[in-house]
Amino acid sequence: MSIAEVRWLPVAGGVELHCLCWEGGAGQPFLLVHGLASNCRTWEAVGDLLAAAGHPVAAVDQRGHGRSDKPDDGYDFATLCDDLAGVIDLLGFERPVVVGQSTGGNIALELGRRQGELLAGVGGVDGGALELVDQWPAWEDCERALAPPRPAGVRFPDMESRLRAAHRSWDDRGVAATMANFETLPDGTVRPWLSFDRHMRILRALWEQRPSEVFPELRVPLLLALADTGDDWVAAKRAQGEGAKRLATRCRVRWFTPADHDIHVQHPDRLAELLHGATVDGFFAS
């Protein structure tokens, strides 16, 4: 199995992004993008499996997240897309498939619209079709509903226990990768690598995006892997998935039932098989 190599890639503005890179083989390259307040390690198991199937793979910590630089600005979708385009260039990937989870899927979608000539396709893992304005027409309501908790004073073991209790089907590797969303302070407590202010700026950019307006402009294939999480989000996701199939030139929707929002952590084998299969059957252009 190919072992991931850690690389630091300088993008515009002197910002360095932390990446995990798998050599893979001669197959379709994949660039994997985490969700809001997450980190690239959550893609480790999927990266291993795609590389074993012959694909060059990279997973990137977006700016402000994980081990990447944390500048004061650049948390709009245009800059985040430019960061990804810079990563693709520096890696030497020729027309990769860019797959993002949650908000990362919406950023991948935006990259497909803005610089689709760089890509062979876009994937959204319980993301990519998120249109928050459907649920919250007013930003102030969205802001109140989705503002993240601030885990001040929570010690690492307690946060890990909370995570395990909430996701009993996750293996130790998935739990450890998700705990890398947090910085451990000298007193043993944790805080998210992504600051609250930057989190809210990205959330505002997500709220302002209208995927239903992006789908008709997308000129690369779109694969959506959606999670039946059994909560109030499912109906909205079904409607958004149907809208993507209707509006995008080429769209495939696959459901994971039941599944957590973090499909890539809970079911890395099934997700990697889906992504690899979409290159084998010709869904993603080579």
Image (cartoon, rainbow, N blue to C red):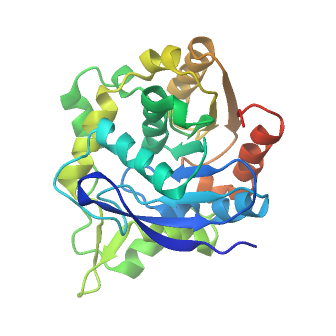
Locate residue 178, reporting x and y percent: 48, 66
Considering depth in this image, is 209 or 20 the residue closer to the camera?
Answer: 20
Identify the residue at horizontal 76%, vertical 73% (top origin). 1
* Residue 140 location, quadrant: top left
Considering depth in this image, is 227 or 246 the residue closer to the camera?
Answer: 246
User: In the figure, is residue 127 to the left or right of 279?
Assistant: left
Considering depth in this image, is 128 or 233 the residue closer to the camera?
Answer: 128
Locate residue 43, reporting x and y percent: 57, 60
Quarter of the rendering occupied by the C terminus: top right
User: In the figure, 58 relative to 36: above or below?
Assistant: below
User: In the figure, is residue 1 to the left or right of 20?
Assistant: right
* Residue 85 location, quadrant: top left
Identify the residue at horizontal 53%, vertical 67% (top origin). 20
User: In the figure, is residue 273 to the left or right of 226?
Assistant: right
Identify the residue at horizontal 31%, vertical 25% (top origin). 136
Q: Is residue 176 visible?
A: no
Identify the residue at horizontal 30%, vertical 42% (top origin). 79
User: In the figure, is residue 280 to the left or right of 66?
Assistant: right
Locate residue 69, reporting x and y percent: 28, 64
